[in-house]
Amino acid sequence: VIAEKMLLAINQDDYASFTAELDQSLKTNLSEREFHEYSATIKSSYGTYSSKWFINAIKNENSVVFIYGLQFFPGRAGVMNLYFSQNDASGAVTRYEIYPPFSR
């Protein structure tokens, strides 16, 4: 649900919806201008987000990362990693990444 909200917020260039899912540190460090630049970069590099699927969850000592495959229109693929702290009960995202899939 959180990944979907963040990806739709990028589609809509909606800073408030995107940052609603972030922990306080990320919210403080991501200005609205930086978000709009990030949103534009994702859309120009990949296209418009259209769907996601769960790939894996990896738990380590301090965090959990959820990995999703992404499909963008008109046909680009990507991967999204969402990091959550084990020590923070808020459930907020502590780090996020969108990048091209690895080629084999």
Image (tube, rainbow, N blue to C red):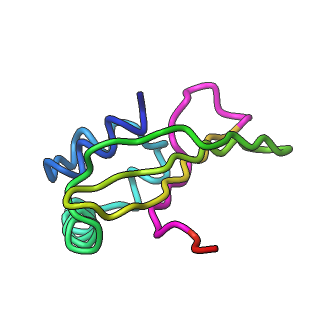
The residue at 50%/55% (across/down) is 96
Magenta-colored stretch includes residue 96: yes
The residue at 43%/61% (across/down) is 78
The residue at 42%/33% (across/down) is 2
Camera-nearest residue between 8 and 83: 8
Left or right: 53 as drawn, with respect to 64: left
Where does the C terminus fall, quadrant-wise? bottom right
The furthest residue to the right:
61
The furthest residue to the front:
104
Where does the N terminus fall, quadrant-wise? top left
The furthest residue to the left:
12
Span of residues in magenta: 86-101
Q: Position of residue 64 (x, y in %)?
A: 70, 41
Left or right: 51 as drawn, with respect to 85: left
Magenta-colored stretch includes residue 43: no
Q: Position of residue 29 (x, y in %)?
A: 41, 61
The correct choice, above or below, for 72 with respect to 23 in the image is below
The correct choice, above or below, for 10 with respect to 74 in the image is above
The correct choice, above or below, for 25 with respect to 43 in the image is above
Left or right: 54 as drawn, with respect to 64: left
